[in-house]
Amino acid sequence: IQTLPPMELAEKYFRIFPEEMDPLWQNPCHDKRHKDIWSKEKTCDRLPKLLVIGPQKTGTSALHSFLTLHPAITSNFPSPHSISLPANFTFEKSANYFDTEVVPKRAAALLPRAKILALLINPVDRAYSWYQHQRAHQDPVAINHTFHEVVTAGPSASKELLTLQNRSLKPGAYATHLERWLVHYQARQLHIVDGTLLRSNPALVMDSIQRFLGVTPILNYTQALVFDEGKGFWCQRLEGGRPKCLGKSKGRKYPEMTPETRAFLTEYYQEHNLELLRLLNRLGQALPTWLREELQSTS
Ligand code: A3P
């Protein structure tokens, strides 16, 4: 047996196994050799059983807040109040998992048994919400360009404008991203939720999510939530019936998209939406109302 000083050894190792330069973390609890040396104080029950993968601007924060109302569900950022509860179903939400190339592979290496939840709204509205989000965050490109300019910019536009365009439009190619998740997860692990319905009738959506997760008890979200007229959204119902809503950055007020831009984007997403229709039919998952409407308007 030969050995080398650490740096040289590492260099030699990665010459032989270059694919390992980018580590792919696996769950130590899934390998007996690792489990045997796993600290007794550590549990195998801490990693998420559910990933809310986004995409961004589809209502992921609302879903996060609704999920944490359930006594058996806790986010991986537990609030100080929930630490002592016997929550046994941990979830993680990240709005950027959905369309980031490497994520499904890495997630599946660590969490092969996780359930995956994706929220989809009309990609046209998602793109506009993202643009408004960037304006609210003082992104100079979003402030200096109309939404129409952003989405219609051609290849000769500035790099910054094209970056914003890409971040507005790319996540909305839903089927392409979902197919990547389906390379690494089985169809039955994936639940696709109509984000527009989550906004208008969250109790209904939360029922279907609870059935998908198989959690007990079944929380009655009709009682747990209340519609706040001022905010224009569903919020948590506190004791005494007062609403506790998400902050100002969720459910922003901004002017409607111009009909020209909507028409442009509806056409832009037509093929993507058809692909999504085929995918959902193949998976036997319900079609969101917005998808039916969008396809009817372009057929
Ligand atoms: P807008 O602010 O553009 O209206 P995310 O949390 O994924 O970033 O999504 C934000 C969007 O969630 C908001 O976009 C809003 O429309 C939507 N949403 C759905 N249900 C909501 C709720 N109960 N409270 C606040 N926002 C909600």
Image: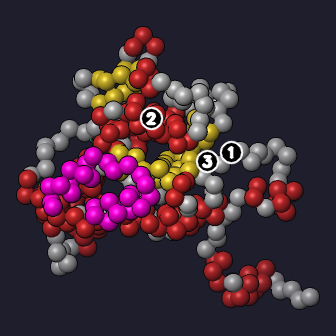
Residue 136 visible here: yes
Which sits earlier in the primary sequence, circle 1 or circle 2?
1
Is residue 282 part of the magenta span, yes or no?
yes
Q: In which quarter of the image is the C terminus?
A: bottom left
Q: Which amino acid does label 2 sit on?
A: Met
Q: Mark 1 points at which residue?
A: 46
Percent x, y of residue 225? 40, 24
At mark 2, the secondary structure is helix
Residue at the image point whose x is 27% and y is 53% from the top: 291
Q: Quadrant of the N terminus?
A: bottom right
Q: Mark 2 points at which residue?
A: 206
Give the mark toward the camera: 1 or 2.
Answer: 2
Percent x, y of residue 192? 42, 50
Q: What residue type is labelled 1?
A: Arg
- Of the four image quadrants, the one with ligand 1 is top left
Percent x, y of residue 180? 47, 67
